Amino acid sequence: MAVTPSRDEGSAEFGLRVEQVDVVEDHEPDVTTLIDGVRAVLGQAVGTEIVTAEIRRFTGGASREVYAIHATDRDGAPVTAVLRRDPPGHGDPARMRAEVACLRAAAGAGVPVPRVLASGDTAPGIDAPYLLMNTVGGESIPRKLQRNPEFEAVRADIADELGYVLGRIHRTPLDTLTALDDSDQLDTIEQIYLGFAEPRPAVEAGLRWLREHRPPPRPVCLVHGDFRLGNLLIDPTGIQGVLDWELAHLGDPIEDLGWLCVRAWRFGASAPVGGLGGREQLLDGYHRATGDRPSADELHWWEVFGTLKWLVLSRFQAERHFGGAERSLELAAIGRRVCESEFDLIDALDLLDPAAPEPVSEPPGATVHDRPSVTEILELVAATLADDIGPALSEDAARQRYLLRICVSLLRISGRELTETGVMSQVRELLGRVDCISEAALAEKIRSAALSYEEKDVRAAVTATVLARVRASNPGYVA
């Protein structure tokens, strides 16, 4: 399961960042080897000798390595391409072959996708399953697509075009795509969630609602699986490329439309379709491509599913750190963003209790310590990092700036949590009203149907616990 592991609605950047990989004579042996491998594969793909090659690595959380290639042939003509490869030693040849098959099949169906130049389970110097594509122009950073003047004209109709492109994807012939997974997506997400052994009332309410309201199944088709801003290249004339097909599978086509409407992919904007347009526009474009117009209820079901899916996958990514598989400040911080999806989920299910109590701050207890207090220390350190140290970093220290922003965020989360000392007593009182000693007990009762997730006191308890987490982690999210 591969998802982008972090998002920052403050900066609204979910696109790829570029880091240059040095190409001077003393570059590291593995980079030199990769460049040599790229030259050979690219030369064979375009039918000419590649004399020089420079690679720049894209970063931003993808599970695969992605490189921009700028090369020249023996006549001095420029040659550009994009390389996707699995991390060496962690390759999945079958999944890469499936992605290649999706790109080729989708291209044949009229979907704007990069053209496959070459692919393989491995190659000398590349040393992992790989995919080489032509370069496609366009922007993928949501903040720029939502705000920059050059995209003003395309913004008016982009939701319609997004629906149209999804319709073309869903009409892709399946005869070359038999290797794709066709398992039930709701079952898959539920099993991942259960693997955490961390019962959550909001998730249990979502699972029950999804089981109780599931729309009739549609004929199986190609589903992109991660169709959203950040995985699209858009220029002022429209969509130029649909990227990142590694989560593609066979399933219900409306899954893609619902995923695109999940709040996480609006990046702080209000419009439901990627922060750029409305659901009706999306359905207009889809009808234009397919002759079919999904109902509002069907789209809503898949939007709820997508919200729950992002919640579970965010927790899955955090588990990579908590479980010891990959020590990472970035992944650990995602654990504090899960509550945002919890809030979105109960909001989408209309389970938010409007009478949920505001947090109460109790006066600090007696202490022998002088000021600054712990909370004051946290804020002082956070402010110094953000206002003094961060701006002093050099312009090429993008990764350090990014990690510093995460550190500042975690320090401020800690400070907010320490000041809301009355929250747990409120939560325990609300849980007691439904005869539960903990959130886990409430989750189990919702799962077993011993309690209805629509019951007033249940809604109050779920809302209070989720809001407590969000107000500590990202108070602006609720506002």
Image (spheres, rainbow, N blue to C red):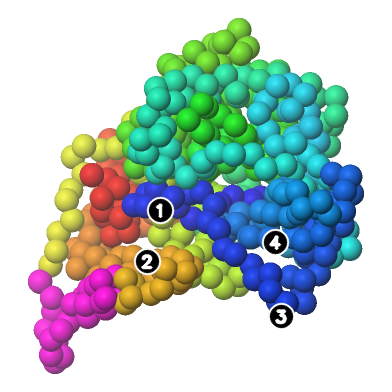
- Which numbered disc, 3 or 4, marks the residue that appears first in the sequence? 3
- Residue 166 visible (yes or no): yes
Residue 9 vs residue 478: left or right?
Answer: right
Q: Which residue is mark 3?
A: 26
User: In this picture, which residue range is highlighted in magenta?
Assistant: 363-388
- Which numbered disc, 2 or 3, marks the residue that appears first in the sequence? 3
Q: Which residue is mark 1?
A: 8
- Check disc 4 and report its element: helix, strand or loop: strand
Front residue of 123 and 169: 123
- Which numbered disc, 1 or 4, marks the residue that appears first in the sequence? 1
The vertical placement of 59 against 322, above or below, is: above
Q: Which residue is mark 4?
A: 54
Residue at x 77% of width, y 61% of height: 52
Mark nearer the viewer, 2 or 3:
3
Q: Residue furthest front?
A: 75
- Which numbered disc, 4 or 2, marks the residue that appears first in the sequence? 4
Q: Which residue is mark 2?
A: 405
**Residue kind at label 3, given as amino acid type:** Asp
Front residue of 197 and 133: 133
- Which numbered disc, 1 or 3, marks the residue that appears first in the sequence? 1
Question: Quick check: marks 2 and 1 in contact, CB under 8 Å?
Answer: yes
- Check disc 1 and report its element: helix, strand or loop: loop
Instruction: Locate residue 391, reporting x and y percent.
Output: 32, 71
Instruction: Locate residue 452, reporting x and y percent.
Output: 39, 35
Mark nearer the viewer, 1 or 4:
4
Mark nearer the viewer, 4 or 2:
4
**Residue kind at label 4, given as amino acid type:** Glu
Question: Quick check: marks 2 and 3 in contact, CB under 8 Å?
Answer: no
